Structures are given as C-alpha cells and as structure tokens.
Image (tube, rainbow, N blue to C red):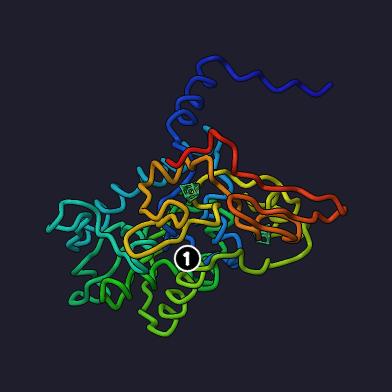
Amino acid sequence: MAELPEAPTPTLKAIYADYEARQGDGFRDHLGASIIGKSCARALWYDFRWITPARHSGRLLRLFETGQLEEDRLVRNLRATGATVLEVDPETGRQFRVEAHGGHFGGSLDGVALGLLEAPKAWHVLEFKTHSVKSFNELTAKGVVLAKPQHAAQMQIYMHLTGITRALYVAVCKDTDALHVERIEADRAMAERLLEKAGRIIFAQHPPPRISEDPAWFECRFCDHHATCHEGGGAAVTCRSCLHATPVEGGWHCARHDRMLAPSEQRAACGRHLFIPGLIPGEVIDAGDDLVTYRMADGSTWTNDARSPEAAPC
Ligand code: SF4
Ligand code: SF4
C-alpha cells in the first residue's frame, strides 16, 4: 500500500502563513516592464486595471525570495571578475528606476556594470534570473531572446530608457547552481514597439481582444484572470475597474468627482463605482446618472446601480 504523505507540521504551516500574510493586496501601481513581453494584451490590461488580485502560496512566495537573495551573490560573483557593479543609483541611493507614459509604466534594474571581460568599456544593464532545470536547459540551448522573450523585452525597455546599449543576462539553475551569462544589444525598434504596446494598454478604456476565445487555450488555462475573462466572473471593485477612472500624467483621475485619486483611494473605490462595460458579459441597453443596465447572454437584464444613499463621494 502506498504511504500517505505526511501532514504539514504546525511549524511549516506557520512559515508559509507568514509569507502569505506579508504578500500585500496583490495590486501593483504601475504596469511593469518585467511583464510587458506577455503575449496577451488583455491579460496586461487586466493586470494594470487590478481585475484579479495576485495571490500566491507561501511556498511560491519563498521561491520568489530565493530569486531576490541570489542577486547579492551574483553581484559578488561579477565583482570577483574585476567588474564595477552598481546596484543602486548613486544620485538617489535607491535602485535604478525607469519610467514612461506619465509614470504608469516602468521598472527597477538589478544593477549596471562596467569593466566586464567581454566588453570592458561599455556600461551594461544587469538582469538576474533564477530558472528551473527545464527552463535553464532551454535557455542555454536557445538563448534568452528565444527561450525567455519576456526577459529579453524587459532588458530592451531598460536599455532604451537608460540609454545604455548593452545588457548582461545572468541566469542561475536552481537545481544545479550552474550559471548562464549572455550579452544582448539594444534593439531600438523593438523597444519602441514595446513602449507603444505599453501605451496602448495603459490608455485603453476597454479590454483589448483575447489572445484566444478558447478558455482551454494553454495560456488561458494558466492565466490569473481566467474567471473574469472567459466566465464573466467578478472583477475586483477598485477605481481601476470603474468607468469614471482614467490614467493621466502622474496618476489617476476620477471624472465622477473631478479629482485625482491617491493609490489608497483607488484601492478602496467609492459607492459610485460602476464597472467598465467591457468587464460585464452583456450588452449595454440603458445608462443614466450612476447606473448602467445590461442585457446578459441568457436574455436577463442586470443593472449596475450606484445610486444608493450610502454611495457618498469619497
Ligand atoms: S484568460 Fe486568456 S485571453 Fe483572457 S486575459 Fe488570460 S490569457 Fe488573455
Ligand atoms: S472614486 Fe468612485 S466614482 Fe471615482 S473612479 Fe473611484 S470608484 Fe469610480
């Protein structure tokens, strides 16, 4: 008879619970350069509009932390080759950061380096990643552009927005600790296409087309937004899913209350919240002050009604 797996001990449960308790609300204020290479524009729009909060298990969160802890060691490894590595911007004392589209798009560099043995005179953007053995083998066989286009896209954005024309990608295999080191060159046309893509997503008032209409499509099966996208499930109620909110230079504006919204207010929303129609699986048949009525796929009607007395402006 097969042995039963051991139940998690209270200590193990407590360790994972600690990670889960510290994971925040799962909403990121800006659209990250690290994800702009995602193939589905709709998934990116859902990310930016906080449609589904990202929730991860304690085990996975600890795995993410492993990737962060690895960064210090990789910096030491590069310095041991004689390279100069800056992990923080000397002017700010913080990570090098890039931004575009009024601050709605951006990311933070792992560092920059000079004096690399391959090209000692050129500054390089540094990008560090950890990989499973399967992913690492594919990376070493194909190179980062083909094996990890999302990582390549991230580096292109960082190079473009810093003006640095080279990047060094350093990957670690989590199973064997083997390293893969690869340089890539700036591709201006690609970076501009990616920036344009980010702008289209950020300033779209409605969800972009799906990458597939088939809910069983492989990218959809693993997508956090599957329920909202294919099943008409409930989007999170925040200002980002409200038809009155628009991203503008430096923040978000509410047309209903005619004012800018702080990040904490965006998370809380107010009683006048009305879903962006593209988030509702129905057709708009009527709209008035603080309400929108839909004909749903089954022929019924549903009214998104924000006229209740407790719907006080925030
Ligand atoms: S479920 Fe599929 S189509 Fe919908 S956002 Fe996710 S990847 Fe895109
Ligand atoms: S403050 Fe209220 S009305 Fe304005 S965007 Fe947020 S939820 Fe919508």
- The reply to whether residue 140 is in sight is no
Depth check: 41 or 163 in front? Answer: 41
Depth check: 104 or 106 in front? Answer: 104
Give the residue type that dot 1 points to: Ile
Q: Dot 1: within a 10 Å radius of its alpha carbon, few (fewer than 14), some, or many (20 or more) residues?
A: many
User: Which quarter of the rendered picture does the C terminus lie within?
Assistant: top left
- Left-right relation of 148 to 302: left
| Residue shown at 50% from the left, 72% from the top | 200
Q: Residue furthest left?
A: 91
| Residue shown at 50% from the left, 25% from the top | 17
- Left-right relation of 123 to 46: left
Is the CB of mark 1 within 8 Å of ligand 2? no
Relative image position of residue 115 (x, y in whole percent): 18, 69
User: Which quarter of the rendered picture does the N terminus lie within?
Assistant: top right
Q: In this rendering, is residue 276 above or below 100?
A: above
Q: Secondary structure at mark 1?
A: helix
- Left-right relation of 87 to 209: left
Q: Residue furthest right?
A: 298
- Left-right relation of 107 to 9: left
Relative image position of residue 133 (x, y in whole percent): 55, 53
Q: Which residue is mark 1?
A: 202
| Residue shown at 66% from the left, 69% from the top | 209
Q: In this rendering, is residue 312 above or below 225?
A: above
